[in-house]
Amino acid sequence: MQADKLLLSGFITERQRELLDIEKLENFFKSELYGKIKKAKRVYRERRFNLLAKPEEVIEGIPERDPDEFVLIQGVIDCFIEKEDGSFAVIDFKTDKVYGYGAEGILVQRYANQLKFYCRAVKDITKKDVSEAVIFSFELMKSINLPEDIYKA
C-alpha cells in the first residue's frame, strides 16, 4: 500500500497516516494522472516561487494602475512535471467539497487565476513552455484539464 511506503520512507508521520483517506489515495495511484507523473522525465513537488504581476492581473475588476506598479506573488506549486517532449505540465491538487453538476466548472472558476500564475512561474523557472495545466480533485477523483489560455498566458 502506498500510504505504508510513505510512512516507512519518513515522508509522513504515523498520525498523518491515520488521517489519510486510503481509498481515495489508492484510487489516485491507479489514475491516468499518476501514470503521467510516473512516466515524467522529472517531477518537481512543493516548489516555492516569487513572481511580479500587475495588480489588475491579481484582482479582477480593479482599474488599471500605474504601469510601473507591481504586486509580489509568493506561492508553492504542488507539482509540475517535465513531459517526454520537454514541455511541462502543472498539476494542482484540490480537496474542495464540490458535488454534482457543474462541480468541475466551480473548481476551474475558483482556481484558474492561481493556475495561470503557477504556469507563468514554471515557465520562468524552467525557461520552457507549459503545455498542460491540470486540477486533480480528490473529492471528484478526477483530473480537470484547464483551457489553453490558462497555461499559454
Image (tube, rainbow, N blue to C red):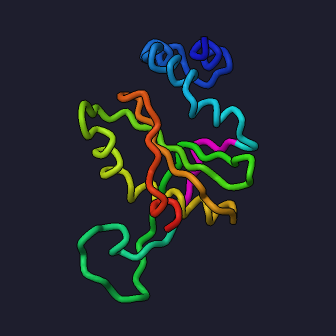
Name the image quarter holding the N terminus. top right
**Any magenta on residue 40?**
no
Vertical comparison of 70 with 39: above or below = below
The image position of residue 8, as x and y in percent, is 66, 14
Q: Is residue 103 left or right of residue 142?
A: left
Residue in the image at 31% along x and 52% along y: 109
**Magenta stretch mostly in which secondary structure?**
strand
**Magenta stretch?**
43-49
Query: How far across and how far down the image is residue 152, in percent?
Result: 53, 65
The count of marks equals 0
Relative to 132, residue 30 above or below:
above
Which quarter of the picture shows residue 98?
A: top left
Q: Above or below — where is 37 with respect to 22?
A: below
Residue lying at 35% horizontally and 88% vertically, measured from the top left = 66
- Identify the residue at image location x=28%, y=45%: 106
Question: In the picture shown, does residue 82 fall above or below 138?
Answer: below
Q: In the visual, does 129 lie left or right of 115?
A: right
- Report if residue 89 is visible in the image: yes
Q: Position of residue 28 (x, y in %)?
A: 52, 24
Q: Position of residue 7 (x, y in %)?
A: 60, 16
Could you tell me which residue is drawn at 61 percent across and 25 percent down?
11
